[in-house]
Image (cartoon, rainbow, N blue to C red):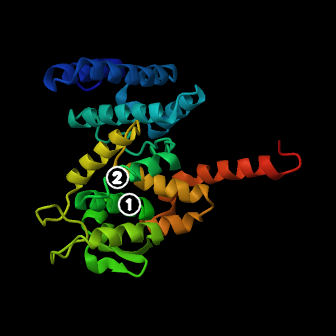
Amino acid sequence: MAQGTTIDAALEHYLWVCRVERNLAENTVQAYGRDLSSMSAFLVRSGVVDPQAVEPSMLSDWIVSLSDRGLKSRTIARYRVSARQFFRFLVDEQILEDSPAARLDAPRVGRRLPSTLSERQVEVLIASPDRSTPLGKRDAAMIELLYATGLRVTELVTLRLAARHDGWLVVRGKGGKDRLVPYGDTAGRALDVYLQTREDEAPWMFITNRGKPMTRQNFWERLRRYAGLAGVRGKVSPHVLRHAFATHLVQHGADLRAVQAMLGHADLSTTEIYTHVAQERLRRMHGAHHPRGA
């Protein structure tokens, strides 16, 4: 591709490379084409046809125009990625020395509240293991403890017996940081019942019938099977139970910083995905109790 090429010509060549040399799926190539045609049309309307004349501010104006058109943040983020890849290609082709899209700001993508379970769904899930058997007692204790603490599944299956201290767990989280997490009386009783079945000297809290520590995959599969037995529809995983723990705490008035500490989030902004749960609880409280709330 020669110097002095137009943006449209460069775009056509880029799509050809994506299709023929990179062997990308046709749907992907077409998506790139749609995104970049929008950018090209905006630049041409601004009187810019030479890739070398494109300034970062022009691309920022294009992103703003997409927002003004009412496009969703996630869609605009995709446009931005397409532009960055296109201009990086032009740098690789030595058409440009630097990419004007290298520091193109992305719109803040709204974070959705992850999938969760209702309190009733958690109840029937916890009741699913057959507690007359050692394995059922172990599985019940694991589900109870996961819901009571919001542990990550890796934290749960790597727990050691020495981590338990009179209603608290010392949990080794991300980055090797320890945190204290309370687990409550109900989970404590389920744990006691399970541990009474143990006659081994393994140091792990939860073990298989071969005396080995439970694996993430094993527990995930067993949890999914219990969900089927309980008739709990939709995605059920250890991570979903972790979100149920946080959601239900906030619904019942827990402070976000306390939830942050229990979840092991380094930054409160990660926990703030649950903010709207607290806001909805306050809205219902206002509607139920304020004299003009109804």
Question: Is 168 situated above or below 271?
Answer: below
Where is mark 2, residue-wise?
238
Disc 2 element: helix
Q: Is 46 in front, or is 127?
A: 127
Q: Is residue 188 visible?
A: yes
Q: Quadrant of residue 196?
A: bottom left
Residue 146's label in the rendered image is 1
Disc 1 element: helix
The number of numbered badges drawn on the structure is 2
Neighbourhood count class around disc 2 (C-alpha, 10 Å): few under 14, some 14–19, many 20 upward: many
What residue is shown at x 51% (from left), y 24% (from top)? 46
Q: Quadrant of the N terminus?
A: top left
Q: Residue 23: percent from the left, percent from the top?
A: 16, 23
Q: Quadrant of residue 255?
A: bottom right
Question: Is 57 situated above or below 20?
Answer: below
Q: Quadrant of residue 224?
A: top left
Tag 2 and tag 1, C-beta contact below 8 Å: yes
Q: In the shown orientation, is residue 292 left or right of residue 257?
A: right
Residue 284's label in the rendered image is none
Q: Is 25 in front, or is 261?
A: 261
Question: Is 68 situated above or below 116?
Answer: above
Amino acid, disc 2: Pro
What residue is shown at x 40% (from left), y 71% (from top)? 188
Q: Quadrant of the C terminus?
A: top right
Amino acid, disc 1: Leu
Q: Residue 167: percent from the left, percent from the top?
A: 43, 77
Q: Is residue 266 visible?
A: no
What residue is shown at x 24% (from left), y 46% (from top)? 221
Q: Is 20 in front, or is 173?
A: 173
Sequence-wise, the earlier of marks 2 and 1 is: 1
What residue is shown at x 31% (from left), y 18% (from top)? 30
Q: In the shown orientation, is residue 197 left or right of residue 253?
A: left
